[in-house]
Amino acid sequence: MIRIAAVADLHFGADLAGTMRPHLEALPERADVLLVGGDLTRVGEPEEAMALAEELRDSPIPIVAVLGNHDYHSDREGEVRKHLEEAGVVVLEGEGVILEVAGTRIGVAGAKGFGGGFVGASGSDFGEPEMKAFIRHTKEVAARVEGALSALDAPTRVALLHYSPSEQTLQGERLEIFPFLGSYLLGEAVDRAGAALILHGHAHKGTEKGVTPGGTPVRNVALPVIRRPYNVYCLGDGDGLG
Ligand SMILES: [Fe+2]
Ligand SMILES: [Fe+2]
């Protein structure tokens, strides 16, 4: 069994220095790995990433993260990523990693994801170049997630996103903004590749629990949704949430 601690939407900054480290030091008793689902910063400034990196540096358990839309806002996402990686955090964008923890292996495929909406109420790559670019970006990210997940040779595989793959975990948000909160294409991609769990954030007013049409459990771990420093999910080898 692998114990996965998960949170998203930390929206960290220098004013929060010292607030995460105590939780991190207590984590090894409760979890084998920490997954962070994007929006690590408020506006993607490297100083915010440096403040978070200091909290996460030399963590007692492996940390894997993806970036969120806020981490792109200052067009300095490369620096945000670099600061976290220098602190020992594995940052994924359309990539996968296999970790050896709890006497077994867990594969994590991660990407920011993107929007577009859900079946019956979604955008399509048709019309203006801006609209085509929007949906094509989602399709490209979904394809990368599918490829990264499929390539992971591990008994337990998890998808880590920022945007939602399911409208179920958006319940509580205004229906009008669902297309900006996620895309069914992400859920379909993970269903095809196969995963025991999808974690995401971004929907601060959403709902924790959902499931894709293909039956993959989805958990929205945005900090304002879970209202605690992290949630812990237990996965057995090859099967679902324990
Ligand atoms: Fe957020
Ligand atoms: Fe976000």
Image: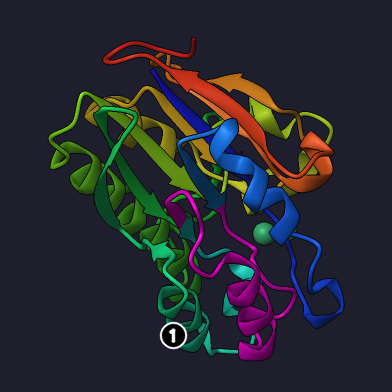
Q: Is residue 178 left or right of residue 114?
A: right
- Measured as percent of width and height from the top left, residue 242 is found at 49, 9
Q: Quadrant of the N terminus?
A: top left
Confirm or reject: label 1 Cβ below 8 Å from ligand 2: no
Quarter of image, res 160: top left
Residue 192's place in the image compared with 45, above or below, is above
- Measured as percent of width and height from the top left, residue 232 is found at 61, 29
The residue nearer to you, when weighing 176 against 74, is 74
Q: Is residue 41 left or right of residue 237?
A: right
Q: Quadrant of ligand 1?
A: bottom right
Q: Is residue 52 magenta?
A: yes
Residue at (87%, 78%) from the top-left corner?
15
Residue type beneath disc 1: Gly
Residue 140's place in the image compared with 177, above or below, is below
The residue nearer to you, when weighing 109 against 231, is 231
Residue 1 visible in the current orientation: yes
Q: Is residue 50 left or right of residue 132?
A: right
Residue 161's place in the image compared with 42, above or below, is above
Number of numbered callouts drawn: 1
The residue nearer to you, when weighing 101 against 130, is 101
The residue nearer to you, when weighing 200 against 100, is 100
Q: Is residue 66 magenta?
A: no
Region of the chain picked out in magenta, as a range: 37-64
- Measured as percent of width and height from the top left, residue 27 is found at 61, 41
